[in-house]
Image: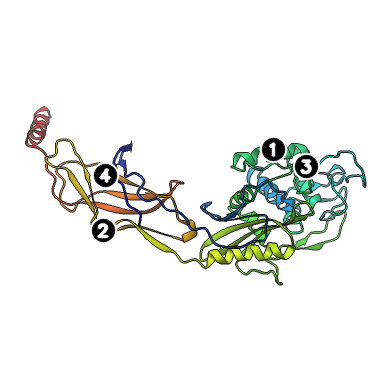
C-alpha cells in the first residue's frame, strides 16, 4: 500500500456540505495486460469508464478501412437523430463509380467495383433502418453514401460535419474523407480514437442492436424483392471465430489497411472494446481480439484500503474549546481489476456543524473519487469525543436567546 499524505484545504461550500481535500491519497499504477498481438496497433478499453487496459501504438495514424462505418453510424444515430422509418431514395450520385484505370483525382466517396456493397439500385426507395443494417451488417459502401446524402444533402457536407463531430467528442487523431472507409491516403484514424467512438456508440441501443444481429430481413422495395442481410463479423456469427461474450462491432479490410477489427464483449457486467489494426491475416484480427478479451476477463478484482478503520481526522471549529477529531468506523476501500487501477483522490465532506458536538455524532464522510469525478467509495466520519463551545461563546449564545425572547 502506498503511503498517504494528508493536507486539508477548503474546496467549495454549498448549502449542506463543506468539502476538504486530503490531497493525493493514493497513487495507483495499473498493470497493463500482457498479451502478444500480431496487429500493428491495438487497444483494449473499458466501455463504461474509458480506462485503457492494453495498448500497442494506440495513437499511431492508421487506415481504418470499413471500421469507418462505426463513426458514420454513431453520427447518424446520436447527432443527426435519424428517423429509422424515414424513406430514402437512392440517387445516381450516391452510386457513382470511379472510372476504371483512371489516373485523375475523383471524389473520395465514389464507389469502386471491388468494394463491399449492399447492391442498391438507382431510384430505389427504402427505409433508413434497412440502410443502417446494410451499412453495419454487410458493410455496404453504397449504403454509407445514401445515408450521408439523406441527412446532409451531399456526401462532402456530411464529411465536414462528421469530422467536426468526431473532434468534438475527443477523436483528435481522426480525419475521414468518406463515410465508408475505402482507401484514401488522407483517410486516417487511430486505434484509440476508434475505441473511444465505439465506447460512445455502444451507449446507443439502436447501434448495439445493429452490430449484434445475425441476420436482417431486407424488405421488398420498388426496385428489388425482399432478401436477407447476413452479419459478416465472425465474432458474433457461429463459426471458427465465434466468441460467445461478443456483442459486435465491425470488421474492415483493404490492401493498405490490411485486416482490422473493432470488437466489443461483455462478461460479469464489464463491457470492453478491443481494436486491432494492420493485421497481416484475417485470422490474426480475430485471434488478437479474443486474446485481449480473455486476458482481461480472466482478471480477478483486488481491494485496496485507502484509509483504515480507526483513522482520525481533525477540524478546527471556531469558538470550540478543542479541535474536532473525526474517526472512521469502517475502512475506506475500493475494488478494481489490476489492469484498470484508478487514479484516486479522497475528499472529506464535513457536515454543517453547530456546537456542541456529541461523541459518536456523524460529522461528515470521506469519498474516494476517480479522475472523472465518479465516487468509487465513501464512509461516514463520527466524532471521537464531545466538542463544546468556549465559555464566552456559550454566554453570547445565551444572551442572544434571551434578547430574542425579549424582542418577541
Q: Is residue 305 left or right of residue 385?
A: right
Q: Earlier in the sequence, mark 2 or mark 3?
A: 3
Q: Earlier in the sequence, mark 1 or mark 4?
A: 1
Residue 278, image x and y in percent? 71, 55
**Which mark is drawn over residue 351?**
4
State which quarter of the image contains the C terminus: top left
Instruction: Using the numbered discs, state the Cα–Cα distance from disc 4 to disc 3 in whole angstroms.
Output: 57 Å
Q: Give the residue at x 15% y 52%.
A: 359
Instruction: Using the numbered discs, state the Cα–Cα distance from disc 2 to disc 3 in whole angstroms.
Output: 62 Å
**Which mark is drawn over residue 56?**
none
**Which mark is drawn over residue 309?**
2
Q: Earlier in the sequence, mark 2 or mark 1?
A: 1
Query: Label 1: which residue?
Result: 161
The answer to whether one can see residue 14 in this image is no
Instruction: Using the numbered discs, state the Cα–Cα distance from disc 1 to disc 4 in whole angstroms.
Output: 48 Å
What colour scheme does the image use? rainbow
Amino acid at each position: 500500500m502506498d503511503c498517504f499524505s494528508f493536507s486539508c484545504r477548503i474546496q467549495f461550500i454549498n448549502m449542506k456540505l463543506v468539502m476538504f481535500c486530503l490531497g493525493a491519497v493514493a497513487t495507483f499504477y495499473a498493470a497493463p495486460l500482457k498479451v502478444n498481438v500480431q496487429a500493428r496497433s491495438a487497444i483494449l478499453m473499458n466501455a463504461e469508464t474509458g480506462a485503457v487496459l492494453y495498448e500497442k501504438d494506440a495513437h499511431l495514424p492508421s487506415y481504418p478501412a470499413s471500421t469507418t462505418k462505426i463513426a458514420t453510424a454513431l453520427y447518424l444515430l446520436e447527432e443527426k437523430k435519424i428517423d429509422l422509418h424515414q424513406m430514402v431514395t437512392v440517387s445516381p450520385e450516391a452510386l457513382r463509380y470511379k472510372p476504371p484505370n483512371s489516373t485523375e483525382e475523383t471524389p473520395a466517396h465514389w464507389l469502386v467495383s471491388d468494394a463491399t456493397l449492399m447492391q442498391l439500385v438507382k431510384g430505389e426507395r427504402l427505409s433508413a433502418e434497412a440502410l443502417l443494417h446494410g451499412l453495419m451488417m454487410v458493410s455496404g459502401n453504397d449504403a454509407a453514401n445514401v445515408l450521408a446524402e439523406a441527412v446532409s444533402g451531399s456526401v462532402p457536407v456530411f464529411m465536414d460535419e462528421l469530422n467536426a463531430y468526431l473532434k468534438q467528442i475527443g477523436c483528435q487523431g481522426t480525419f475521414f474523407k468518406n463515410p465508408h472507409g475505402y482507401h484514401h491516403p488522407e483517410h486516417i484514424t487511430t486505434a484509440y480514437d476508434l475505441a473511444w467512438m465505439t465506447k460512445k456508440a455502444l451507449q446507443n441501443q439502436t447501434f448495439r442492436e445493429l452490430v449484434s444481429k445475425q441476420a436482417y430481413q431486407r424488405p421488398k422495395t420498388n426496385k428489388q424483392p425482399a432478401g436477407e442481410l447476413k452479419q459478416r463479423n465472425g465474432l458474433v456469427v457461429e463459426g471458427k471465430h465465434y466468441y460467445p461474450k461478443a456483442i459486435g462491432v465491425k470488421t474492415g479490410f483493404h490492401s493498405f489497411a490490411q485486416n482490422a477489427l473493432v470488437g466489443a464483449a461483455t462478461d460479469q457486467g464489464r463491457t470492453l472494446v478491443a481494436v486491432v489494426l494492420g493485421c497481416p491475416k484475417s485470422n490474426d484480427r480475430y485471434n488478437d481480439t479474443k486474446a485481449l478479451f480473455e486476458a482481461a476477463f480472466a482478471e480477478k478484482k483486488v481491494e485496496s484500503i485507502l484509509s483504515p478503520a480507526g483513522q482520525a481526522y481533525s477540524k478546527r471549529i471556531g469558538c470550540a474549546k478543542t479541535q474536532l477529531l473525526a474517526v472512521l468506523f469502517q475502512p475506506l476501500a475500493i475494488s478494481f481489476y489490476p489492469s484498470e487501477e484508478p487514479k484516486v483522490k479522497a475528499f472529506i465532506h464535513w457536515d454543517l456543524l453547530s456546537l456542541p458536538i456529541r461523541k459518536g455524532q456523524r460529522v461528515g464522510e470521506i469519498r474516494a473519487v476517480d479522475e472523472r469525478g465518479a465516487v468509487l467509495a465513501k464512509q461516514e466520519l463520527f466524532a471521537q469525543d464531545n466538542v463544546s463551545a468556549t465559555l464566552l461563546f456559550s454566554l453570547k449564545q445565551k444572551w442572544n436567546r434571551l434578547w430574542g425572547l425579549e424582542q418577541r
